Amino acid sequence: MTFAIHGLAVSRGVAIGRAVLVASSRVDVAHYFIEASEVSAEIHRVRVGRDLVVDEIHRLQETITHMGPKEAPHELSALLDVHLMLLQDGELIDGVKHWITDRMYNGEWALTTQLEVIARQFDEMEDEYLRERKADMEQIVERVLRAMKGVGPSIVAHHQQQRASRKPAQQDLLLDDTVDVPLILIAHDLSPADMLQFKQSVFAGFITDVGGKTSHTAIVARSMDIPAVVGARTASQLVRQDDWVIIDGDAGVVIVDPSSIILAEYGFKQRQGELERGRLQRLLHTPAVTMDGEKVHLLANIEMPEDAPGALMAGALGVGLFRSEFLFMGRQGRLPDEEEQYQAYKRAVEGMQGLPVTIRTVDVGADKPLDDSLRDDAHLNPALGLRAIRWSLADPAMFLTQLRAILRAAAHGQVHLLVPMLAHAREIRQTLAHIDHARAALDNKGVAYGPVKLGAMIEIPAAALSLPLFLKHFDFLSIGTNDLIQYTLAIDRADESVAHLYDPLHPAVLRLVADTIAAGRAVGKEVAVCGEMAGDVGLTRLLLGLGLRTFSMHPAQILAVKQEVLRSDTTKLAPWAQRVLLAEDPTRELASA
Ligand code: PEP
Ligand code: MG
């Protein structure tokens, strides 16, 4: 039966495919497709993993038969019997074979997929004893996964790319339900680090139950440029493994088990979207200049050095925000050393072929834990806690390491160094002192480094209200509207339950943005916007009218924003933008323009 789930629109476009439900705790399992010729070897790999666990349990059973009832209670031996029985479970074994043979999933992926199917059946059981066997099933699958780590080939990246690039035509979709059907990832939650894993992956779209529009998970999804919906609340419970789903990333709607009429309708919409993107490509080499001759800088936000070539291909004239924290995530607490960071920043700089790269010092904390296991549940308000520059200043050795690496990368091209979350004069002084210190350390060692322009993010209202202080110490400012909105309106950007109050057009937000742009212009210093507002085509004209000339956004948005720029006349937009700024309801004023 067809039904729809409403969430928050995160990343535009339409995706149609089969649901792949992934439990958040198992997201780090490798997901890749195997080749037809590898099917039997893959089934064998899982079997070997399972046999290893069976042997392990037999050995345990042997040991406990020699123990007394005190050291080895009867329950333990009963539990081992249950585990042995579950390891032989026909549904588990047949299901895993099905996912490997018919869908060509790798063994780990097949195991966790079948576990989701079985876990759901357990959840629906009336009998409490049987319901509780779900935990046992989860445990044995975890054990097999662990055993498989030592068995045969692990993740094979080229499989991912090869298969991910094979997208069937829409008409094939309806007829040919084979391994080439696009897959839609559905999870309760995905951390930004998880999302990063999926960057090169096989999925054509994704849906999460939780998350706000500007949560970092959503931001990474947007940078992947695949349709996505977050805040879909119960999606991971309502959708079943392998259901057909449509994601309407523009409307934030998920349609489950669509009828053929609905499928045809969305297939049409999908093709329209592709045509529109094709049309925008014609603007790739057109300079972003308004009708009245104002030059506008359209820059890219990136997460990894490997994103640089994509940014160039999308028409970016530089990187306005390299979120360096993604280099620090998912590494079980082992942070990248100076050399590793230097190489990464250098790759980004060289990747941009002489265009400027703005490297932001690490911004972890809040909804960007270094590792999922380090998720900050201990503090009640992590967004107000030790994140970004506060974290860096609390660990000077780590901060100095990063600063030295950035300064060294500046020897290879234009680098701008951007500091997040500053609010206090004291923090500014400390940051500048650390930069001097990093330069001195490199001088002492005779290591080459280059000049950098220094920038501060304006993303705390206190900073937006202390602009002379910032303009005195920095060469440029970059407005982080995602956080500026969060902190001005006291709305947790990652919390879907207050997402309706997250309003870029609130008069207070607009006032802070407008004042920051005006203050920078008054002293001839560059002001950029690098929050999600910069890539929102509905706001391009307003920001231009407020005097903004530097926009940094996801590469996929650049051409659409450029189209708006080309159609704009800032001499007309400026007085109108002032009216919007003073309006009681700017949203209505914007709509009436
Ligand atoms: C912002 O806050 O707007 C910003 C660009 O930084 P981040 O989204 O990484 O916090
Ligand atoms: Mg921010």
Image: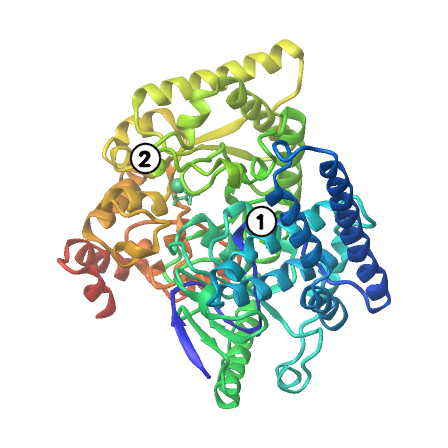
Q: Which residue is mark 1?
A: 196
Whole-percent x and y of residue 436?
49, 16
Q: Quadrant of ligand 1?
A: top left
- Mark found first going from the N terminus, 1 or 2: 1
Vertical arrangement, residue 203 with respect to residue 385, above or below: below
Q: Amino acid at mark 2?
A: Leu
| Other-residue count near label 2 (Cα within 10 Å), few / some / many at <14 / 14–19 / ≥20 | few
Taking the spot 25% from the left edge, 55% from the top edge, the residue there is 501
Q: Is residue 322 visible?
A: yes
Taking the spot 55% from the left edge, 45% from the top edge, the residue there is 193
Whole-percent x and y of residue 202?
65, 62
The answer to which quarter of the image holds residue 583 is bottom left
Taking the spot 40% from the left edge, 18% from the top edge, the residue there is 430
Q: Secondary structure at mark 2?
A: helix
**CB within 8 Å, label 1 to label 2:** no
Vertical arrangement, residue 465 with respect to residue 573, above or below: above
Q: Nearer the viewer, residue 339 or 447?
A: 339
Q: Nearer the viewer, residue 577 or 553?
A: 553
Q: Amino acid at mark 1?
A: Leu
Residue at the farthest top position? 444
Whole-percent x and y of residue 488?
24, 43
Horizontal side of 191 relative to 584 (left or right) equals right
State the separation of the CA atoms marked 1 and 2: 24 Å
Q: Is residue 226 visible?
A: no
Residue at the farthest left position? 584
Task: Specify whether tag 1 is near ligand 1 (CB below 8 Å).
Answer: no
Quadrant into which the C terminus falls: bottom left
Horizontal side of 210 relative to 328 (left or right) equals left
Residue 384 tag number: 2
Q: Nearer the viewer, residue 508 or 92?
A: 92
